[in-house]
Amino acid sequence: MTAVQPKPTAHSVGETFDSLSPATDEVVGTYPVHTREDVRAAVARARDAAEWWAGLGYDGRAERLRRWKGVITRRLPQLCQVVRDETGKPIADAQLESVLAIEHIAWAGKNARKILGKQRRAAGLMMSNQAATVEYQPLGVVGVIGPWNYPVFTPLGSIAYALAAGNTVVFKPSEYTPGVGKWLVDAFNEVVPEWPVLQLITGFGETGASLVSANVDKIAFTGSTGTGKKIMAAAAETLTPVIIEAGGKDAVLVDADADLEAAADATVWGAFSNSGQTCIGVERVYVHERVHDEFVAKVVEKSKDVRAGSDEAAQYGPVTMPSQLAVIKRHIADAIERGGKALVGGVDAVGDRYVQPTVLVDVPEDSAAVKEETFGPTVTIAKVRDMDEAVEKANDTKYGLGSTVFSKSRGLELAARLRTGMTSINAPLSFAGIASLPFGGVGDSGFGRIHGPEGLREFARPKAVARQRFTAPIVLTSFSRKEKTDALVAKLITVLHGKR
């Protein structure tokens, strides 16, 4: 039986929809389809709560965030089961993303004051009578539109940082994972019962569009490039700033001196974990010709031990979004029809729920499997004459999210040359687990950053203040200044900046 999308149903108090297990089609929850009016009411409540939440200050907010992560940590098995029910991923994978999210909540709460608090700036010689400071103030209300593939880790990368910066948040999770969103919001409201600081809205694309147009102060979106463009266009109508974290076509570079065992293991895990439904997952590999054959043999051998399924022994679960099955199948078929070879898997690896691992070689660089985001458990491996060719091919994409380099001697050099927002060296996707590092991409992978200091600043506005400490001997901002004052200024600026 083919998995189906969440179903809208009639309800006495309005339209609802069912959240379905992608493994069984079992209904695991029913949620309201929030209307435009519902969304605007939620934003209005968030606006009322914003002053109170900001007024708690950094320490007060950090304490509530600390208690929130405590609730999540103590009830981790419960959360992981909700994630498994709605995505089909193994409990261990649900735990991994949740643990990383907890780390980010902790980091944001602990570091918000240091990053966003008042800082002194040099006033310069010409304005030496002034004291200059910058501090970051909350934006107000932030709308977060989350994805289904990592329904804990990804949205909390925006939510936790927005909250730590002093904003209230209205959160719309994916229609495929509303139960995860509700669980997270309910846990937060246990430790912040006074005001609706973090609210949940559920529904489909129209509900998300309503949030974009609801006069929030910023939108943080994670999803496809196409949807991100639509959100930007809608947000432009009200000049609402946005953070877009879209897709990727991430590459791994394997140099001649690489640890091939580690590189092969990282490739297999990065390509197939979470059924390949990872925006920073491995989709392409470029391997130095001197080690290509040995590397491919290791990848093939490791891939044979990986299996999709819903049983406890399976390494990953079903494809969550049914429409993606056709995309995965088309990419594999196109690669093979154009001369590529499936050393593991192939077109028959695509079932009605699960896709078994597929390793492709000799695939043309202009094929769909290389150019388009597959978002499934497939990987292409290509031989290159050197790392210059590898960098060139890795960068020949409209995307630019993450990347990985395996090299004992040239890791930093190669990483610097890759046109991506993030690169890990000699380990898979490690940048995502380091809370102090910014996360985001370039090109069709989007813009703006979550995580780290940059992520905190995304959810605050800089406020510059200049305070006169004493009256300057030369007053420039007055109609009463004399010609000799202008002449003196001209001489002074020449001395300071006129040297050849």
Image: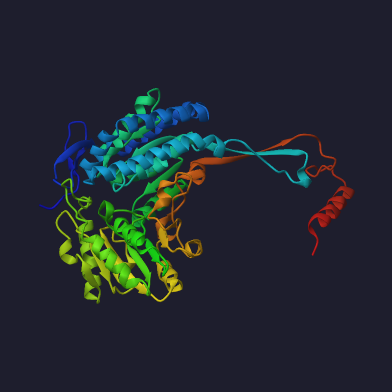
Quadrant that contains the C terminus: bottom right
Q: In which quarter of the image is residue 496?
A: bottom right
- Using residue 204 as the reference point, say whether residue 429 is left or right of it: right
Q: Give 140 or 193, whichever is nearer the viewer.
A: 193
Q: Give 159 or 434, whichever is nearer the viewer.
A: 434
Q: Give 223 or 58, whichever is nearer the viewer.
A: 58
- Using residue 389 as the reference point, say whether residue 131 is left or right of it: right
Q: Give 113 or 147, whichever is nearer the viewer.
A: 113
Q: In this view, does 363 lie above or below 427?
A: below
Q: In this view, does 185 lie above or below 481?
A: above
**Residue drawn at 24 percent across, 42 percent down:** 91
**Residue drawn at 34 percent across, 51 percent down:** 223
Which percent across, then down, holds residue 369? 29, 67
Q: In which quarter of the image is residue 37?
A: top left
Which percent across, then down, holds residue 292? 34, 72
Q: Is residue 42 above or below residue 302?
A: above
Which percent across, then down, holds residue 468? 75, 35
Is residue 497 visible in the rendered image? The answer is yes
Is residue 167 visible in the rendered image? The answer is no
- Using residue 464 as the reference point, say whether residue 103 is left or right of it: left
**Residue drawn at 87 percent across, 50 percent down:** 488
Which percent across, then down, holds residue 342? 22, 69
